Image: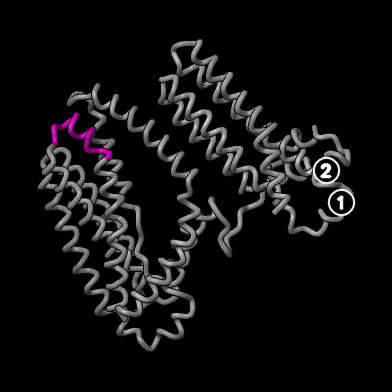
Amino acid sequence: MQQFYKDRLSRHQTKLIRYLKYVFNDHVVLISSFLLGGFGLYYSDLVKTLDSRFILGKPLIGLIWLMALFTGHLATLMKDADKVFLLPKERQMTAYLKAAYRHSLVLPLSFLLLAAGISMPLLVAVARSSILDFAIFVLMLWLLKASHLLQQFNPCFLANQKTQKKEQLIWLLLALVAIISSLYLHSLAGLLVAIVSLIIQFSATKKTFATKNLDWENMISNEQQRMKRIYQFINMFTDVPGISGKVKRRRLFDGLLNKIKKTSENTYLYLYSRSFVRGAEYSGLFIRLTLVGIIVLIFLNEFMLVLIVSLVIIYLIGFQMIPMYGQFDYMVMTELYPLNNQAKKKAVNTLVRLLLLIVGVIFSLLALIVLPNKLDSLMVIAAIFVEILLFTTLYLPSRLRKIDRF
């Protein structure tokens, strides 16, 4: 059964890798670099101003660690047909679930390392912790996560719901005690509590495996929910079979859409505008990129950084809106419209220009706020609107012509 899990895991990972190349594309990497760079610069400057008198430091670190413990879930990779075809192998499923547990321990370790690494400069500033303490903190968090994953075996078995909730509460209390002990007493104190938590949960899980039968329906349902969350995240970057964006009425924007004159020349403009407002694909992308830009710019006060981030985010927003041009090519009714492709191009150009102008105004206001030199602010504002002009008059029409040729 261990080999069966490995084969299923291999197919699962191959499938995810095909999607991840769309998630971690050049634009996402570029945005992430600016975001991390801006955060790192701000965080570095902030830590230099803190010392042991900053009483919120340890509670903030404890909150970050506790949140990190909830990342990563037990990956059983169960499928709906398993409740029929694997039922005769129920007694052998122990080896399968143990293999799932070992695999599920790997990914959370990276998140825990990241959480501990981010919090360590702050911890050094407020508590003078050492590299040895860092290693102990990571080990403590990993042991707490190991006991948390063991606790997630409970829904896989037919058991009393009250007992399962009681074990969840015990794990949470022990995790809080371990984190608080490590921050306020000694790093080894937290590690000791984490070891106790793992021993308690291991004993309870061992008893569950020996005395309880599998709850196939619940186990499969939990795995389906886990995969649904993963696919919903991937769906923000590319289409995933079986996952579609939600369409909402959004009456709030009816007043804006009604300002579009009801003429044949504006057919595509209304269609693209209504689709943008009601759909989640392009509007969600627009909102996310805009928020990323706002968050980064808030923490910057240098001319070149503000200029580069503003121009890059605006370009990325415009670039990500280009596929909107072919959004309705699959619909037969659009082929019956007595309108040519020039009307489509004009509509997309008008909508993209409006969206970029909205972002340009927001970034311009932020530049006026964050930059101490107003001349620098004016230069950033001028560069923003020149970029929007060049993008919508030269680059976008050229890209749309290339799309038509293909």
Number of disc labels: 2
Position of residue 264 measured from the top left corner of the image (x, y, whole percent): 88, 41
Query: Is residue 14 rendered magenta in the image?
Result: no
Q: Which residues are magenta?
A: 118-129
For label 2, the crowd category at 10 Å Cα-Cα, with few meaning under 14, some 14 to 19 and many 20 or more, is some
Relative placement, left or right, of 81 versus 338 is: left
Q: Which residue is mark 2?
A: 267
For label 1, the crowd category at 10 Å Cα-Cα, with few meaning under 14, some 14 to 19 and many 20 or more, is few
Res. 167 in view: no
Q: Is residue 291 above or below residue 380?
A: below
Q: Which residue is mark 1?
A: 337
Position of residue 323 measured from the top left corner of the image (x, y, whole percent): 65, 48
**Secondary structure of residue under mark 1:** loop
Relative placement, left or right, of 221 versus 96 is: right
Residue at 31% over, 57% down: 107
Q: Quadrant of the N terminus?
A: bottom left
Give yes or no for contact between labels 2 and 1 (Cβ–Cβ under 8 Å). yes
Residue at 52% over, 34% down: 313
**Main secondary-structure element of the magenta-colored stretch:** helix
Position of residue 395 measured from the top left corner of the image (x, y, whole percent): 65, 36
Residue 303 position by quadrant: top left
Q: Is residue 41 above or below residue 239?
A: above
Q: Nearer the viewer, residue 361 or 399?
A: 399
Q: Is residue 50 above or below residue 212?
A: above
Residue at 29% over, 52% down: 110
Q: Is residue 220 above or below residue 269?
A: below
